[in-house]
Amino acid sequence: MNVKLESRSIAALVNELLTPEQLEMYQVYRQTLGNKPLLFGGGSPDTGGSEDLSGVEFINGTRPGNPELVELAKRQVGNVGGQPYWSWYGFNSRVEWCACFVSWCYNQAGKSEPRFAGCEWEGVPWFQSHGQWGARGYDNLAPGDAIFFDWNQDGTADHVGIVIGTDGSRVYTVEGNSGDACKIKSYDLNYECIKGYGLMNW
């Protein structure tokens, strides 16, 4: 009996074995599988609680926002573990789910796009390729924009949330997978870990 062993990469096999739809999901899964908070698409390591918006006075820019989307996102505060966001996206078990949360919110607001599970490899390129990107310091934010973070400042987006608004010095957000929970957070507008903003057209 002769047995011939051949070494082939998983990447080569999946192209032969999976349908195009399954292959797309596999690629997304590879991008999010095992993500830690400080890796691409991972989330936020924040272990603090959700912030109180009492007394915050938001300054509206000239771009139209989507207050209903923001209210929907705020109603998710307190969710732990990311269900139903990652399952809505199509995953059978938990993945690092910050981008799934943002995509779920946009879908609930009637937008089929953007839809992304990975921050750096899907979310940022979608906004940039559609001419809807603002770098850190962008001063015409609108409720419902996406905010991307680069925690270790290596040029790679690690986390994404939804902009609630700004008071002129801080930006306020709703974020999924912030310490594995939905939370309201805020940051100085010049915070060095803000990579940029996905600017939504409503």
Image: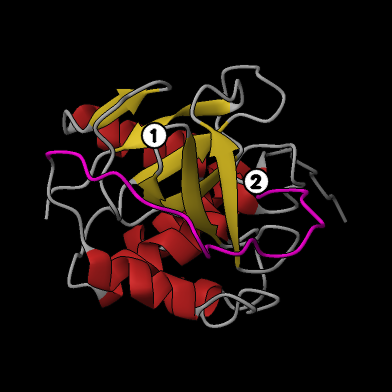
Residue placed under numbered mark 2 in the picture: 10
Does residue 51 appear to the left or right of 126 in the view shown? right
Q: Residue at x 25, y 46 (%)?
A: 142
Decide whether the magenta segment is chiefly helix, strand or loop: loop
Name which quarter of the figure residue 106 lies in.
bottom left
User: Is residue 91 magenta-colored?
Assistant: no
Labels 2 & 1 near each other (Cβ < 8 A): no
**Closer-to-camera residue (120/49):** 49
Q: Earlier in the sequence, mark 2 or mark 1?
A: 2
Name which quarter of the figure residue 12 lies in.
top right
**Closer-to-camera residue (168/176):** 168
Q: Which mark is residue 13?
A: none
Q: Can residue 143 be seen?
A: yes
Q: Residue at x 46, y 35 (%)?
A: 121
Q: Amino acid at mark 2?
A: Ile
Is the residue 24 above or below the residue 118 in the image?
below
> In the rendered structure, which segment of residues is drawn in magenta?
42-62
Residue placed under numbered mark 1 in the picture: 168
Does residue 35 appear to the left or right of 79 in the view shown? right
Q: Residues within 10 Å of mark 2 (few under 14, many from 20)?
A: few
Q: Residue at x 75, y 64 (%)?
A: 49
- Nearer the viewer's eye, disc 2 or disc 1? 1
